[in-house]
Image (spheres, grey):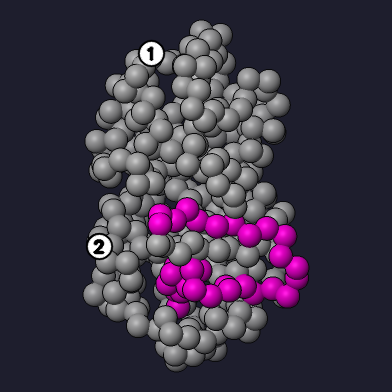
Amino acid sequence: MVNKNGIFNINSQSQFEGLALKIFKHQFENNKVYRSFCDLLYKHPSEVKSIEEIPFLPIQFFKSHRVISSIKDIQEIFTSSATTGQISSKHFVTDIDLYEQSFRKGFQHFYGNIEDYVVLALLPSYLERDGSSLIYMVNDMIANSKQPESGFYLNNLDALKNTLIDLDSQNKKTLLIGVSFALLDFVETYRLELKNTIIMETGGMKGKRKELIRAELHETLKQGFGVNTIHSEYGMTELLSQAYSRGNSLFKTPPWMQVLTRDTEDALTIQAYGNTGGINIIDLANINSCAFIATQDLGKVYKDGSFEVMGRFDNSDIRGCNLMVI
């Protein structure tokens, strides 16, 4: 069994790769769905010598299968949002401490102590349903900020405007984290000039608006909030870790998470740096589900490990993989 505490103490690429290969072997042996997937690809841990050779499970399996590598009791079930007729992804979490450690240490890695911030959240589509991993994370951030002004906002945008202006005038470091459509709703009504506030979008229009390219979204938000940059958080129901962008649309991962890209025509081929392809994610915090996931996002990865998200696959299934029948 892999020691979970080692996941958050990685300080070199060789450490990451060594632990990733150990977790691959553990999940091959303990995750029935992942084992079946690997068997169909004729991939066995004895033959896999690098992270590029590890099979990445298509993310749709979280909609159709119970993806789990642990025999412990389920502590939380995180679910994705879904429009009418769609099936939600389900992430069965047997150790919520792993998630809490991951998002706490991840935020600290990029932004420092959460107690230095007033945390405001504008996440209406998430607040209005159960099972959101994002709400779980932000609720924890609000509590641990220990700032009386921290809190969620739903439809009370005028109150949010007043709070932002008041905090900014007091030179208080503030983080406003919001879903894209709600932030756009806000700036259509209000125009601010904020000097001490980080605006962080979590992506997604959730069927509320036409999808925008990130550059267009950020330009509109920069003008509306009067800030020089827009930050971004990249996470999903199927992961326990997040990547962050500090304003240039380039995301960076914490030490226990890495991104690769695969060929869009051959899902089993990992691409060289700088090429656009399907985003594959290694999230070692996912030790109890699956740490190796092929997402439906398109992007580019650069030599320094940073990556950008270009969009999503047009079709709902990842091309080159017809193994969903297992």
Q: Nearer the viewer, mark 1 or mark 2?
A: 2
Span of residues in magenta = 55-84
Q: Can residue 245 be seen in this view?
A: no
Q: Quadrant of residue 188?
A: top left
Query: 257 or 60, which lies in front?
Result: 60
Q: In this view, does 287 lie above or below 156?
A: below
Residue that badge 1 annotates: 193
Give the answer, above or below, for where 116 lies relative to 177. above
- Image location (x, y in percent) of residue 16: 55, 64
Q: In this view, does 112 lie to the left or right of 5?
A: left
Residue 20 drawn above or below residue 227: below
Q: What residue type is labelled 1?
A: Glu
Q: Name the residue under label 2.
A: 314
For label 2, the SS is loop
Is 119 magenta? The answer is no
For label 2, count other residues whose C-alpha is less than 10 Å away and answer few (under 14), some (14-19) or many (20+): few
Position in image of residue 153 (x %, y %):
54, 28
Measured in 3D between alpha carbons, the distance from the residue under mark 1 to the one under mark 2, in whole angstroms, is: 38 Å
Residue 119 falls in image quadrant:
top right
Q: Which residue is drawn at 73% across and 75% down?
A: 71
Furthest residue to the front? Answer: 84
Inspect the magenta stretch and tell me whether residue 63 lies in it. yes
Residue visible at 55% across and 63% down?
90
